[in-house]
Image (tube, helix red, strand yellow):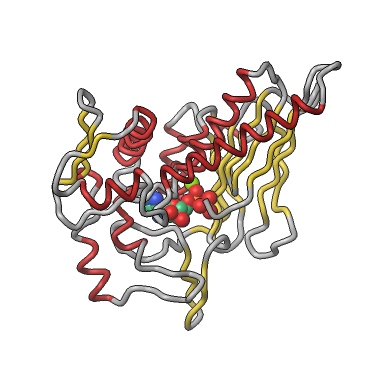
Amino acid sequence: MGTLAHVEFWLEDGATKATADELILAVEQEMQRIDQTMSPYIATSALSVINRDAATRPVIVSQELFDLLTDAHHIAVLTHGMFDITYASIGYQYDYRKHQKPNQAAIKKALTAINYQTVILDKSSLSVKFTDADVKIDLGGIAKGHAVKNCIAILKKAGIEHALISAGGDTTLLGDRIGRPWFVGIKHPRAEEKTAVQLPLSNESISTSGDYERYFIEDGVRYHHIINPKTGDSARNVVSVSIIGKNPTYVDALSTAIFVMGLQQGMALINDLPDYEAIIIDNQQTLHVSTGLQQD
Ligand code: ADP
Ligand code: MG
């Protein structure tokens, strides 16, 4: 998934190091399994098979992938297409390491293939089909949240009650940190080693999307990995969005979506959703929080 993962947990007194090692291995293997399934860079991944074949035949997928695609669809509807896995037609034309971006003609052509409604999910056959020949999908905005969710489930099943798992900007906290909350930092968007805020959290998930993770600057303009599906260009209204909630998959996708929506629209949406809170740093580096986080 192109990022670092981190796991911490407490075992009951009397548990052995072997138990801890086994659990760490199980978490590692789960992350790798998801990468193998959902990576666009692995030709044999289920995602690559969908991208290759779904325009010509319905592709049968696992229940897990079907459910994730269903979540992605729900979030696309909720965010009026600002989260859209079909952004990939344009997304695949950016290479941040090589400082490559599509030109206007390429963007114009790719935009016609960006529309989540062209991805048809059939529940009875667990299949995926594209109604447009040029559609491609990418799960980079939701897969890490899903991975963290599954890994927490593994620990929970093993009887763990206090844990933290993160993958890149996605963190889930199981329980508290033995009588105290966990503290999760939100990176300072313009000073790599600094933290903008520290949040005390227990039994929550938090996902941060920032324009400083993958980017390059050309002629003073920052080209980064969060794309507005309506324009094909990087979203530049805000620089960092963190979403807090119970569902790791949803907070992951929502942080990407709210980033694209920007401060006014994005905050309005979060304030309408009772189960989610937001911390947004705008492009003047001012911090804004949703109503549920404001103290009166
Ligand atoms: P990170 O990957 O750094 O944790 P995000 O959670 O914000 O950051 O996800 C950004 C990723 O989401 C991009 O790398 C890309 O794979 C994908 N993405 C970018 N723009 C969109 C979009 N508008 N809708 C859905 N996915 C997107
Ligand atoms: Mg995200």
Which is more toward the observer, 202 or 47?
A: 47
Which is more toward the observer, 207 or 42?
A: 42
Where does residue 192 sit, x and y in percent of width and height?
69, 62
The image shows a total of numbered marks equal to 0
Q: Is residue 145 left or right of residue 61?
A: right
Where does residue 46 sit, x and y in percent of width and height?
35, 43
Q: Can residue 262 be seen by looking at this rendering?
A: no
Which is more toward the observer, 225 or 244?
A: 225
Where does residue 175 sit, x and y in percent of width and height?
69, 22
Task: Identify the residue shown where x is 47% and y is 27%.
Answer: 274
Q: Is residue 211 left or right of residue 140?
A: right
Q: Can residue 72 be seen by looking at this rendering?
A: yes
Task: Identify the residue shown where x is 23% and y is 33%.
Answer: 127
Q: Which corner quadrant of the image does residue 75 belong to? A: top left
Q: Is residue 68 above or below residue 131?
A: above
Q: Is residue 180 above or below residue 104?
A: above
Where does residue 41 sit, x and y in percent of width and height?
42, 57
Q: Is residue 7 left or right of residue 273?
A: right
